[in-house]
Image: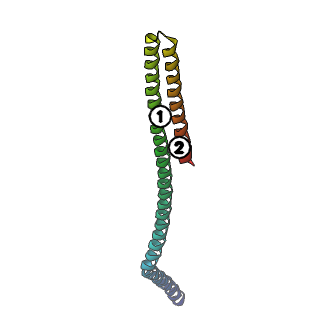
Amino acid sequence: MWSNLKQKISDELSARVARIVNDLDAKNNTPEIENIFINNATTRLDNIEEACRNDFGNISSEFTSIKTSIEALRNEMIQRYAIAQRLQFDFDQLSVANHSSSSESSSSRLSDSSLEENRNRFKRVFNLNREQDSLIICLKL
C-alpha cells in the first residue's frame, strides 16, 4: 500500500513538474512569439499602405487627366466666344450700314455700292471665320 501511495504521489508530482516546465517554456518563448506577431502585422500594414499609395497615385492621375480635359474645353469655349463676339460685331456693323444705306440711298448707284460693300464685308467675315476654324482644327491635330 505504501508503495502504491508513493507511486501515486510521484506520478502526480511528475505531472505537476512537467506542467510547470511546459508553462515556463511557453513563457520563455513569449518574446519570440511577440516578434513573429509584430513582424507579420508590420508586413500586412506595409502591404496595405503600398496598396493605398498606388490607389492614390491612380486617382491623382485621373484627376490630372480630367483637369487637362476641362482646361482644353475651357480654352475652346473662350475661342468660340471670341469668334462669336467678332461675328456679332461685324453683323451689327453690317446692319447699321444696311440701315443707313437703305434710308439714305435714293439712287440705284448708291444702292449698288452699298450692296457691293456689304458683300465685301460678308466675304471678309466669312474668310476670317474659315481661317479661324482651320486654325482651331490644326491646333486640335
Identify the disc placed on residue 139. none
| Residue 87 spot, x, y in % from top left | 47, 29
Q: What amino acid is at disc 1?
A: Ile
Counting the numbered discs, the total is 2
* Crowding near the residue tagged with mark 2, few <14, some 14–19, many ≥20 C-alpha atoms within 10 Å: few
Q: Quadrant of the N terminus?
A: bottom right
In this picture, is 120 found above or below 35? above
**Residue located 54% across and 30% down the image:** 123
Q: Residue at x 53, y 47 (%)?
A: 139
Tell me the SS state at disc 2: helix
Q: CA distance from mark 2 to mark 1?
A: 12 Å
Q: Amino acid at mark 2?
A: Leu
x 46%, y 45%: residue: 71
Picture coordinates of residue 84, whole percent (x, y)? 47, 31
Q: Quadrant of residue 127?
A: top right
Q: Position of residue 4 (x, y in %)?
A: 54, 87
On residue 135, the disc is: 2
Quadrant in the picture for residue 31: bottom left
Which residue appears farthest toward the top when viewing the image? 106
Residue 20 point in image, percent of width and height: 45, 81
Whichever of labels 2 and 1 marks the residue nearer the N terminus, that label is: 1
42 or 140: nearer the eye?
Answer: 140
Q: Is residue 137 left or right of residue 30?
A: right
Most extreme residue toward the bottom, as rendered? 3
Q: Which mark is on residue 83? A: 1
Q: Residue at x 56, y 43 (%)?
A: 137
